[in-house]
Image (spheres, rainbow, N blue to C red):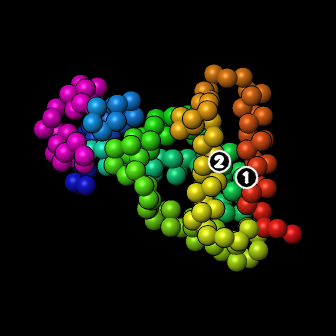
Amino acid sequence: MPELPSTARGAATSRRILDAAAEEFAERGIAGARIERVIHAARTNKAQLYGYFGSKDGLFDAVVADSVDRLTAAVPFDAGDLAGWAVGLYDAYLRRPDLVRLTTWIRLERRPTGTLFETADHVRKIAEIAEAQAAGRLRPGDPYDLLTMVIAMSCAWSPASSIYTATPDEPDEVHARRRAFLHDCVSRAVTAPA
């Protein structure tokens, strides 16, 4: 990815581009997204967009990296409380359904199989799960599979669900019920057998 601007004005422009592009890609995917709509929404021009991100694919990669970073920062990970982490992800998906839609587009248009993201943070999470497993706090098995399952459970009511997508306007008691159910299910799934 090209180096992003270091001036405050340049950083503000690149942020507007990333935000506008995230919305465009989440709604329309890579193939359906149009740079013209992004530059209009970001109040910039093609020269700046391509100067910062190189290409439409480079912009998409930057949007995905930015979105993953934002989600990671929004929900602190604790291998000792995977159930709490899953509930935090549930809430993050309510606040930012566009992040889930972006990952769906990646699966549809770029990486239909295999690992979706391989970040240093992801590697750290797997290592922490392995440590908790070695200490007998989490059920044995492939730590990557355990992480995958917890994330999948957290997505049960997200835009990735094939059954039902939750929204923030639903009653608080509905969200509270789902959070409690998710917490219980994840706890039961990951706790080491007695």
Q: Main secondary structure of the magenta part?
A: helix
- Within the magenta stretch, is there residue 43? yes
Residue 20 seen in the current view: no
Residue 24: image location, x then y, percent: 34, 31
Q: Position of residue 134 (x, y in %)?
A: 70, 77
Identify which residue, 141 or 79, lies in the foreground. 141
> Residue at label 2?
153
Specify the quadrant of the image occupied by residue 44.
top left
- Alpha carbons under labels 1 and 2: distance apart: 7 Å
The quarter of the picture where the N terminus appears is bottom left
**Sequence-first disc among 1 and 2:** 2
Q: Residue flagged by tag 1: what amino acid is it?
A: Val
> Which quarter of the figure has residue 49?
top left
Residue 186, which numbered label? Answer: 1
Residue 55 in view, yes or no:
yes
- Residue drawn at x 44%, y 59% is 114
Q: Is residue 126 above or below residue 22?
A: below
* Amino acid type for the residue under numbered disc 2: Met
Q: Residue at x 20, y 28 (%)?
A: 36
Magenta-tinted stretch:
33-58
Rendered residue at 66%/70% (across/down): 141
Total numbered labels placed on residues in the image: 2
Residues under numbered marks 1 and 2 in contact, where contact means CB atoms less than 8 Å apart: yes
The disc at residue 51 is none
Q: Secondary structure at mark 2?
A: helix
Q: Position of residue 69 (x, y in %)?
A: 45, 51
Q: Residues within 10 Å of mark 2 (few under 14, many from 20)?
A: many
Numbered disc 1: secondary structure:
helix
Q: Residue at x 69, y 56 (%)?
A: 82
Q: Where in the figure is residue 162, as x and y percent of width and height?
A: 57, 35
Q: Nearer the viewer, residue 34 or 107?
A: 107
Looking at the image, the residue that sits furthest to the left is 47
